[in-house]
Image (tube, rainbow, N blue to C red):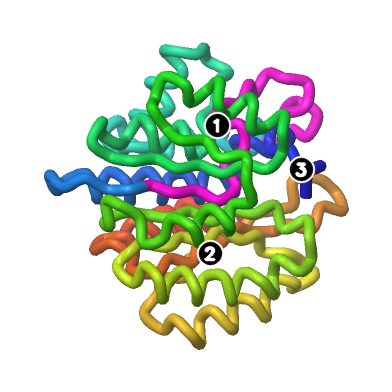
Amino acid sequence: MLSYQHIYHAGNLADVHKHSLLSWMLAYLTRKDKPLTYLETHAGRALYDLDAEEARKTGEAAAGIARTRGWFGPEHPYTQVLERVSAEDGPNAYPGSPLIASHLLRPSDKIHLAELHPAEHAALELAMSPTGAKCHLRDGFEMAFALCPPTPRRGLLLIDPSYEIKSDYDDIFRHIAKLHRAWNVGIIALWYPILKSGAHGPMLEALSAQHKDALRHEVRFAPARPGHGMVGSGMFVLNPPYGLAEEARRLGARYAKLL
């Protein structure tokens, strides 16, 4: 797990799916004048340079955000964050989910981020230092178990593992069940890859059976390169905000035109 670095994949089609829906949810939550908590179990470094050698090597950003940025109108919160980050950090800067959260949340809101990779954690702390976010050098699920239910109690937890460890698919079902019991009013959002191998299938079947009212949204796209096993992106959201299903349908129609 400590070998994973998201810079190779930042801004890809899966990020666009995940980050646009996350942006919409956070903007929705801040419509109410009540503080909230944002937690993230696998935060990464928060800010990515899409002109870096690692990003250019895979070409995933070129096939992702560079191709799809026009999908989102100027009023969409994802567009607004992208424009702010470009203005502050340059045209090749891309925000990870922690930075997206910091741009959309308010001073009264709390942000807790976990990252276990030492170098990624150091970069995360640097990127997030002006925001007041708490960056934990800790296993993300350990952090979530320790903090849930958080204060403030309103809020959202993003679970976005690398899935490099095969046991993740077995463990996540149990972890989400435990977190939901502890924080039954929280929005719990899980990102997962859609794989040619079908390795994600049993996990999704178990989650769907246990959480029948959750929103499950998936998009498909061509592999990033020959032999690449990921052919789509999914989001599984417990306690989905009102209107998220409609937003997801609009986004799905855009992805369908790529195929």
Circle 1: residue type: Ala
Residue 74 place in picture, x, y as percent: 30, 30
Residue 135 place in picture, x, y as percent: 52, 35
Residue 84 place in picture, x, y as percent: 38, 20
Judge depth for marks 2 and 1 and give the one in front.
1
Circle 2: residue type: Glu
Residue wearing tag 3: 4
Assign a secondary structure to mark 3: loop
Q: Is residue 189 left or right of residue 232?
A: left
> What residue is drawn where x is 85% and y is 49%?
226
Q: Is residue 48 magenta?
A: yes
Q: Which residues are magenta?
A: 38-60
> What residue is drawn where x is 32% and y is 46%?
26
Residue wearing tag 1: 46
Q: Earlier in the sequence, mark 2 or mark 1?
A: 1
Badge 3: residue crowd in 10 Å (few <14, some 14–19, many ≥20): some
Viewer-side residue, 91 vs 119: 119
Q: Earlier in the sequence, mark 3 or mark 1?
A: 3
Disc number for residue 218: 2
* Image quadrant where residue 194 sits: bottom right
Badge 2: residue crowd in 10 Å (few <14, some 14–19, many ≥20): many
State how far apart marks 3 and 1 are (Cα): 14 Å
Viewer-side residue, 235 vs 137: 137
* Image quadrant where residue 120 sits: top right
State how far apart marks 2 and 1 are (Cα): 24 Å
Q: Quadrant of the C terminus?
A: bottom right
Residue 168 place in picture, x, y as percent: 70, 66
Q: Is residue 225 left or right of residue 111?
A: right
